Image (cartoon, rainbow, N blue to C red):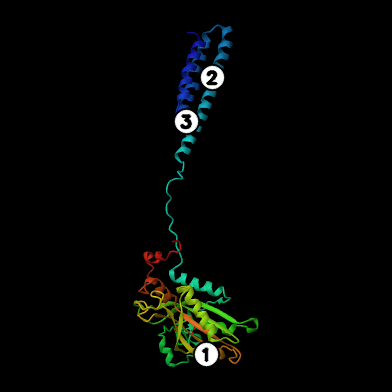
Amino acid sequence: MGLKDKLTELKENALKEINTAEDLKKINSIRVNLLGKKGPITEVLRGMRDLPKEERPNVGSFANKVRDELTSAIAERKERIEIIKISKRLEEEKIDVTLPGVPVKAGQPHIIMQVIDQIEKLFLGMGYQVVDGPEVEEDHYNFEMMNLPKDHPARDMQDTFYITDKLLMRTQTSPVQARTMEKHDFSKGPLKMISPGKVYRRDTDDATHSHQFHQIEGLVIDKNITMADLKGTLQLIARTVFGEEREIRLRPSYFPFTEPSVEVDVSCFKCNGQGCSVCKNTGWIEVLGAGMVHPNVLKMSGIDADIYGGFAFGLGPDRFAMLKYGVDDIREFYLNDVRFLKQFSQRG
Ligand code: DAH
């Protein structure tokens, strides 16, 4: 067989091998074997020594052509393998958008916060400001400015965590009344505020007591404020939280910082006033305390009680939530058991 035939046969075989190579490793080893110094093409070229001189250029250029063809066949195959590799990977990494997703666990506001938010929204809509006060409070604001001087018997109504003689954990949100009144500039308009927050009492925790719970304080001071304004406001709270059909009733009571003072009952939302276990067969449920701000409280905060007057109220979001959702143990709110809390998801 002549050298040209040898080269042609070699080319055919090599092309077959190149075009069936499956990976880069294989194609590289083919390249090294075929075109390297010890490869078959070099071998054939070496055989040219035995050819007559005039045939050498012809065979030589044929051999170069064969080498070029094989070199480009190898390059093409390499490219092809790369493409196959990429499309295989794309195929493998394809996302099946029809697969069900992994559920995302999202949190939600605590049930007490939901009640507070609802009442905040109601009052913000009526132009009240929402005010914060310190939980570590001065005796001065918590008691004295609320018309509860030292040794006043009504101090016993609230067992107090004292930090020092003068500092305590606030037992009520009422001190925010005094703090706000002191700063208020009546030339800019009436004072209308609510103040939600945590309060503390030295109680032993049980189903209806917690050493820490929540209150929302409300206060309006202006000229010509009457008890009718108070009653309308309280009715709005009752209807917003417990339903449109609710009625309220006021019973005389005592708080040192209001005169007159009232205890507020709401008609039972469970039995509509017929009598049931929730309202203890009375048709009414006690929900909050309120009254007309005591002149002493106004005076101590630097307000002229002959010109200005107003009403105040204090309610317990914990109690509201217990009543509304039939929770019979206040401690549930503070244990933070997710199984309990997620019952009040707003996402349905
Ligand atoms: N501070 C009272 C308490 O903790 C609740 C209260 C009652 C607040 C009547 C008021 C009010 O502003 O007018 O028991």
Q: Which mark is residue 24?
A: 3
Asked where in the image residue 53 lies, by quadrant, the reply is top right
Residue 327's label in the rendered image is none
Residue at 54%, 24% (x, y): give it. Answer: 72
Q: N-terminal of the two: label 2 or label 3?
A: 3
- Above or below, comparing residue 51 to residue 205 in the picture: above
Residue pushed farthest right?
187
Q: Earlier in the sequence, mark 1 or mark 3?
A: 3
Mark 1 lies on residue:
294
Q: Quadrant of residue 26?
A: top left
Q: Amino acid at mark 1?
A: His
Tell me where residue 123 appears, x and y as whole percent: 54, 75
Q: Residue furthest front?
A: 274
Is ligand 1 less than 8 Å from the beta carbon at label 1? no
Could you tell me residue 341's position as x and y percent?
40, 66
Mark 2 vs mark 3: in front: 3
Q: Secondary structure at mark 2?
A: helix
Whether residues under marks 1 and 3 lie with C-beta atoms below 8 angstroms apart, the answer is no
Please state which amino acid type lies under the numbered disc 2.
Answer: Arg
Label 2 – label 3 distance at C-alpha: 20 Å
- Mark 1 vs mark 2: which is more N-terminal? 2
User: For the residues marked 1 and 2, what is the alpha-carbon distance in whole angstroms?
Assistant: 109 Å
Position of 28 with respect to 282 (left or right) is right
Q: Mark 2 — residue?
A: 67
Alpha-carbon neighbours of circle 3 within 10 Å: few (<14), some, or many (≥20)? some
What residue is shown at x 50% (from left), y 74% (from top)?
119
